[in-house]
Image (tube, helix red, strand yellow):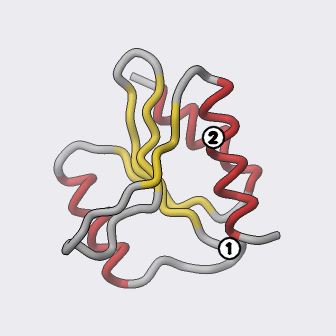
């Protein structure tokens, strides 16, 4: 399975929940997660999508830790089976 397949699964499942999974790029600020997931009722989270078994780079880990320290939800997704789990966590209170 390729990273793009996992990313498309995230996009489609977010859409089915009434949300969107925007491609997130931050010019001049490397290492930010790939997708900004926005779900109904002001729920949001950042998702770094990887091919199965691939790990985030050190800078990506640091950026996700920074986002979490600011109170945001941030995840690594490398398997379609985890997509619903992550979306459930984003939608949780």
Q: Residue furthest front?
A: 27
Residue 39, position as x, y percentages in the image: 47, 26
Q: Residue furthest bottom?
A: 58
- Based on the displayed image, in which of its 4 quarters is residue 64 positioned? bottom left
Residue 72, position as x, y percentages in the image: 28, 44
Q: Residue furthest top?
A: 41
- Based on the displayed image, in which of its 4 quarters is residue 28 positioned? bottom left
Which mark lies nearer to you, 1 or 2? 1
Give the residue at mark 2.
85
Give the secondary structure at mark 2.
helix
Residue 90, position as x, y percentages in the image: 46, 34
Q: Classify 42 as above or below 2.
A: above
Q: Nearest the camera: 42 or 24?
A: 24
Counting labels gives 2
Residue at the (33%, 66%) spot, across then down: 32
Disc 2 crowd rating (10 Å Cα; few below 14, some 14-19, many 20+) is few
- The C terminus is located in which quarter? top left
Q: Classify 58 as above or below 52.
A: below
Q: Nearest the camera: 86 or 10?
A: 10
Disc 1 crowd rating (10 Å Cα; few below 14, some 14-19, many 20+) is some
Give the residue at mark 1.
51
Left of 62 or right of it: where is 77? right
Residue at the (27%, 68%) spot, across then down: 63
Q: Which tag, 1 or 2, sits closer to the chain's start?
A: 1
Give the secondary structure at mark 1.
loop
- Based on the displayed image, in which of its 4 quarters is residue 6 positioned? bottom right
Q: Residue furthest right?
A: 1
């Amino acid at each position: 399975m390729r990273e793009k397949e996992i990313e498309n699964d995230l996009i489609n499942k977010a859409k089915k929940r009434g949300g969107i999974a925007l491609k997130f790029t931050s010019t001049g600020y490397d290492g930010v997660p790939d997708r900004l997931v926005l779900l109904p009722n002001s729920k949001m989270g950042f998702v770094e999508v990887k091919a199965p078994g691939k790990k985030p780079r050190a800078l990506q880990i640091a950026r996700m830790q920074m986002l979490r320290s600011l109170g945001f939800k941030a995840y690594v997704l490398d398997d379609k089976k985890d997509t619903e789990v992550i979306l459930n966590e984003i939608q949780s209170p």
